[in-house]
Amino acid sequence: MSSSRFITLEGGDGSGKSTQAKRLVAALKTHGIDALGTREPGGSPGAEDIRHLVLNGDPGRWDALTETLLMFAARNDHVERTIKPALAAKRWVICDRFTDSTYAYQGAGHGLARETIRRMEALVLGDFRPDLTLIFDLPVEQGLARTKGRGKEMRFESFDTDFHERMRDCYLAIARKHPERCIVLDAAADEDTLAEAVWNMIAKRFKLG
Ligand code: TYD
């Protein structure tokens, strides 16, 4: 049995990463690997309560700093109560969004200083980081077209195209800065093609049969 791994999936709204996260968990299970699928904000009872606070209501409900503190409060609970215990039990953890989302949304999107986020990251996570991050990259217009009419928590999706462009650039910059951790995928591909690309990457990276 391979040792546990922590894999995060990132991307803009409508990039299809949530579907791919579920498919990856299923594929790992098929290969005899015990995997836990989880998400942010959320993933533990306390963090799900915070998720409700942060994702619902008026777009101006929280300023960028408060919103980021809430994200990291949720993240701390999630990491300590869900992610680390699962990894300690030798399970793989597949997480739909993690700290890179904070750099993209609260940082690039809402303009909170990178350094402020970095300090919160250091405080909450120490040197705990994902083993691998898959970034699902898609032209903004395409992503927004895909999310139209999805009746879900929408506080974040009411932001304009420019906001999403800045986020996309931020993700690509993160990938360039951390090539050992990040892989960028072309999320315009159809679901099955993308799932196959994800699996091939995981199998190669972690030497799975
Ligand atoms: P969700 O409904 O899970 O959407 P998606 O399918 O796009 O992941 O909503 C999560 C929202 O929270 C999403 O719009 C991104 C946002 N978010 C942040 O702004 N900062 C963060 O740190 C995280 C984890 C998520």
Image (tube, rainbow, N blue to C red):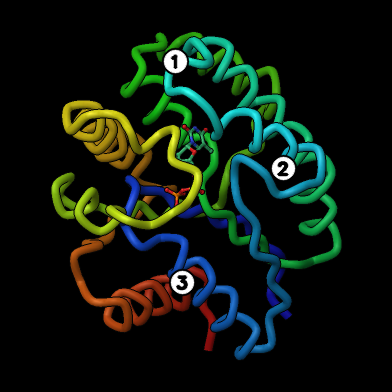
Q: Position of residue 31 (x, y in %)?
A: 61, 89
Q: Which residue is mark 1?
A: 60
The earlier-in-sequence mark between 1 and 3 is 1
Query: Mark 1 Cα within 10 Å, few/some/many (few <14, many 20+)?
Result: few
Q: Which residue is mark 3?
A: 202
Q: Amino acid at mark 2?
A: Glu
Left or right, 22 with respect to 34, comes to left
Q: Amino acid at mark 3?
A: Ile
Per the rendering, the mark at residue 197 is none
The earlier-in-sequence mark between 2 and 3 is 2
Q: Which of 206/172 is in front?
A: 172
Q: Position of residue 1 (x, y in %)?
A: 73, 81
Give the label, 2 or 3, closer to the camera.
2
Measured Cα–Cα span from mark 2 to mark 3: 28 Å
Left or right, 36 with respect to 86, comes to left
> Residue at (32%, 56%) from the top-left corner?
149
> Residue at (68%, 29%) from the top-left corner?
125
Left or right, 138 with respect to 35, comes to left
Give the label, 1 or 3, closer to the camera.
1
The earlier-in-sequence mark between 2 and 1 is 2
